[in-house]
Image: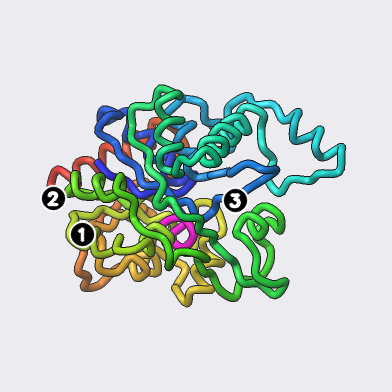
Amino acid sequence: MLVLSGGTGTPKLLEGLRRVVSEEEIKVIVNTAEDLWVSGNLVCPDIDTVLYLFADKIDPEKWWGVRGDTFKTHDCLKSLGLGEILKIGDEDRSIHILRSEMIRGGASLTQATLEIARRLGIKARVLPMANEEIATIIETPLGDMHFQRFWVGLRGESEVYGVRFRGIEKASLSKEVLEALHSEDEVIIGPSNPITSIGPILEVGGMRKHLERKRVVAVSPLIGDRPVSGPAGKLMRAKGLEVSSKGVAEYYRGLPDVFVIDERDPWSPGDNKFEIKRTDTLMTSAEKSVRLARFICSILEEL
């Protein structure tokens, strides 16, 4: 089972999938375009969220960071005049330090991620979408800025003119990602932000062509014209897309065989090259995540 994931939405689905199928069967290709270096260490927010989920460490309230983490280092740095763009917990930071030391020692991001997963006792295979550094750049009236400055620093309040992925043209699919793609006939595109979480994965060299040969189930992260979480609506408008499941489907055009939308979604699609399935996609508890996971697994069995 191969899943494309960003942060928050898809990890909630992964929480359900790991209770429905064996973790050893799950492979996850994770967005890295929101990564950045903070205080000398590489922070990979989406990768870490997936790692902490499978390691049973995720903070279930925020859906990022480590449950029960402390922030002494972050607070001390702030008191010394070094303000960090992200509020990083102490245990969380230890993973960043380990990753960064591995990379400085010559490891690729993929090698570092797989080794960290091994040390955390994770059975699922968690893979960065690429080893090269890629950054989501948000174009705003205040200038072009990294996604984290826009979303965390400015709380997503600025107007958005455009979105681009710096460095994506030089990125390629790693041999580990290619192996995962070649080993699976079915792919789940999780309910993460379509523009800044799934979009970069789809734009890494040749990914769309690989997916066109697969049986793909995509899950909409919107209900009506509202994202379940995050700035997807503003970013979709900047891309000229309708803020709706229809707009998400348009962005994924040519890929899904089945598109899953919420049972409350008012979209009434006409003729499509994919099938529409409706269910409750709002994962407000582990039980609801399991129900959605079972629903998706039943679709995969039908395909």
The reply to whether dot 1 and dot 2 touch (C-beta < 8 Å) is yes
In terms of sequence position, does the residue under pointer 1 or pointer 3 come before the other? Answer: 3
In terms of sequence position, does the residue under pointer 1 or pointer 2 come before the other? Answer: 1
Residue that carries the numbered disc 1 in the rendered image:
257
Q: CA distance from mark 3 to mark 2?
A: 38 Å
Helix or strand or loop: what does disc 3 sit on? strand
In magenta stretch: residue 193 = yes
Helix or strand or loop: what does disc 1 sit on? loop
Work out whether 210 lies above or below 73. Answer: below
In terms of image quadrants, where is residue 142?
bottom right
The reply to whether dot 1 and dot 3 touch (C-beta < 8 Å) is no
Q: How is the image coloured?
A: rainbow
Quadrant, the N terminus: top left
Region in magenta: 192-198
Q: Position of residue 40 (x, y in %)?
A: 67, 43
Residue that carries the numbered disc 3 in the rendered image:
36
**What residue sits 38% from the left and 43% below the top?**
127
Nearer the observer: mark 3 or 2; the answer is 3
Residue farthest left in this picture:
302
Nearer the observer: mark 1 or 3; the answer is 3
Residue type indicated by callout 3: Leu
Residue that carries the numbered disc 2 in the rendered image:
303
Nearer to me, 160 or 223: 160
Residue type indicated by callout 2: Leu
In magenta stretch: residue 249 = no
**What residue sits 44% from the left and 73% below the top?**
241
